[in-house]
């Protein structure tokens, strides 16, 4: 979802704060030396932190904890979300863990009927909540799951600023800035979760509190498909049981405006490339977005030309493309994104053909949406790639890492 005025992206409830992108030639910058994270991979088995056992868990697991994630599934994998605790005593709120944003928003009881389908945070029941009269609105550029924006006013939130204690995976931080949702447009009705926990690459909010306690500002994501299940977020460490082989580390782009952005010299489709995609661009990695976006329709159409001439724009939802559902699953559609690791060696991250079919358009069920969309000003990689890999998001060292996910074997 893209916030009006500040260019934030949103693809389900509250997803992804996206900032301005800049193109960069990989060969023109100095290649950073490899950085070894100050945590060792560990093997975790517990999926939830038992209440009252945080101290012993820290000693056993190197100050790390796992949080179970659910998959919001609507014919395809859309978003992964899990529980955090807000307030004193703690109230459970399900949130998207969104690598495209920094702040925390939770649905509040003040919202009432417009938020009837979401779990809510009751500020009056928290002894540590500090509220304010500061109310703002946020507008977004894309909508529920894989749908596209139909109007500027379709996805809007009204937020009240405040502070309270926040716990994730048993780790607690006091006085975290948060926004309670006091009203929203009806387009959000389908969302089963009650907010968003920003997971951007800046040590602020909850992450600043962890650092102040000597806990690593680092997390791992195992975004397994619904058919596999057991998706998890690891706070403060790396779960080596969720991947095979070695992790490959990549520095955040030096031109990043504050998102998880990686420089790419080229994209390949079924092993081929053309001038439109054989060029340097910077991709945002966003756990809150299911699909892939390019900022130019000509680029998207050059990709589809390498797959099938039958893939056409779907004018009812601008920026999307489709093909007859009885043809799509037979198409070869492997997409390889090339990146440079911390030693300057190129490697590929791959989306297999099995991810290409997003499912039928609601208004035209015999036509299936293809995975790559066009949206001005945005080059973004979402869950269709991230669920192929175990990913590490290292805030302290401003880098990411990838290894093949055990769920993709």
Image: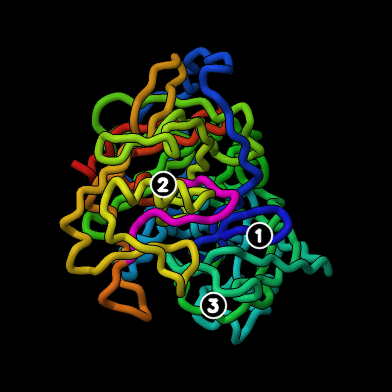
- Splitting the image into 4 quarters, where does residue 261 fall? top right
- Is residue 211 among the parts visible in the rendering? yes
Q: CA distance from mark 1 to mark 2?
A: 26 Å
Q: How is the image coloured?
A: rainbow
The residue that label 1 is drawn on is 3
Kindly indicate whether the residue at mark 3 contacts the one at mark 2 (C-beta within 8 angstroms).
no
Residue 305: say if magenta: no
Left or right of 385: which side holds 170?
right
The residue that label 2 is drawn on is 233
* Crowd rating for badge 3 (residues with CA inside 10 Å; few <14, some 14–19, many 20+): some
* Span shown in magenta: 369-380
Which residue sits at x=51%, y=45%? 379
- Splitting the image into 4 quarters, where does residue 163 fall? bottom right
Q: How far across and down, in percent of the image, does residue 368 sit? A: 29, 68
Between circles 2 and 3, the one closer to the viewer is 3
Q: Looking at the rendered structure, which numbered label has been put on residue 394?
A: none
Q: Which mark sits nearer the N-terminus, 1 or 2?
A: 1
Q: Nearer the viewer, residue 227 or 19?
A: 19
The residue that label 3 is drawn on is 187
Q: Nearer the viewer, residue 91 or 75?
A: 75
| Quarter the N terminus occupies | bottom right
Q: Dot 3: what SS? A: helix
Q: Is 287 rendered above or below residue 160?
A: above
């Amino acid at each position: 979802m893209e916030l009006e005025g500040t260019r934030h992206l949103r693809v389900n409830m509250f997803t992804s704060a996206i900032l301005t992108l800049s193109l960069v030639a990989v060969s023109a910058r100095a290649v950073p030396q490899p950085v070894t994270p100050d945590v060792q991979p560990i093997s975790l088995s517990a999926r939830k932190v038992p209440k009252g056992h945080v101290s012993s868990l820290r000693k056993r697991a190197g100050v790390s904890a796992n949080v179970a994630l659910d998959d919001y599934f609507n014919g395809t994998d859309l978003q992964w979300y899990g529980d955090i605790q807000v307030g004193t005593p703690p109230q459970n709120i399900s949130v998207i863990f969104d690598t495209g944003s920094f702040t925390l928003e939770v649905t509040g009881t003040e919202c009432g009927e417009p938020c009837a389908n979401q779990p809510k945070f009751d500020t009056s029941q928290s002894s540590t909540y500090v509220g304010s009269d500061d109310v703002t609105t946020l507008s977004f550029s894309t909508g529920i799951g894989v749908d596209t924006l139909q109007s500027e006013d379709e996805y809007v939130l009204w937020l009240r600023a405040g502070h309270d204690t926040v716990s994730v995976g048993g780790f607690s931080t006091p006085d975290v800035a948060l926004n309670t949702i006091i009203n929203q447009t009806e387009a959000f009705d389908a969302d089963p979760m009650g907010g968003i926990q920003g997971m951007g690459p800046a040590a602020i909010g909850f992450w600043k509190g962890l650092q102040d306690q000597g806990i690593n500002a680092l997390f791992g994501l195992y975004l397994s498909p619904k058919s596999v299940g057991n998706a998890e977020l690891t706070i403060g460490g790396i779960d080596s049981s969720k991947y095979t082989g070695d992790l490959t580390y990549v520095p955040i782009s030096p031109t990043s405006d504050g998102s998880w952005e990686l420089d790419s010299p080229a994209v390949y489709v079924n092993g081929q490339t053309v001038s439109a995609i054989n060029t340097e661009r910077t991709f945002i990695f966003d756990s809150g977005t299911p699909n892939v976006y390019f900022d130019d329709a000509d680029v998207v159409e050059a990709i589809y030309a390498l797959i099938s001439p039958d893939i056409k724009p779907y004018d009812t939802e601008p920026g999307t493309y489709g093909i007859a559902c009885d043809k799509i699953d037979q198409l070869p559609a492997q997409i390889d994104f090339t990146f440079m690791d911390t030693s300057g060696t190129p490697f590929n991250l791959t989306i297999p053909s099995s991810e290409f079919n997003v499912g039928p358009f609601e208004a035209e069920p015999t036509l299936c949406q293809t995975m790559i969309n066009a949206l001005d000003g945005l080059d973004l990689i979402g869950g269709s790639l991230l669920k192929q890999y175990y990913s590490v998001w290292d805030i302290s060292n401003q880098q990411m890492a990838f290894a093949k996910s055990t769920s993709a074997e």
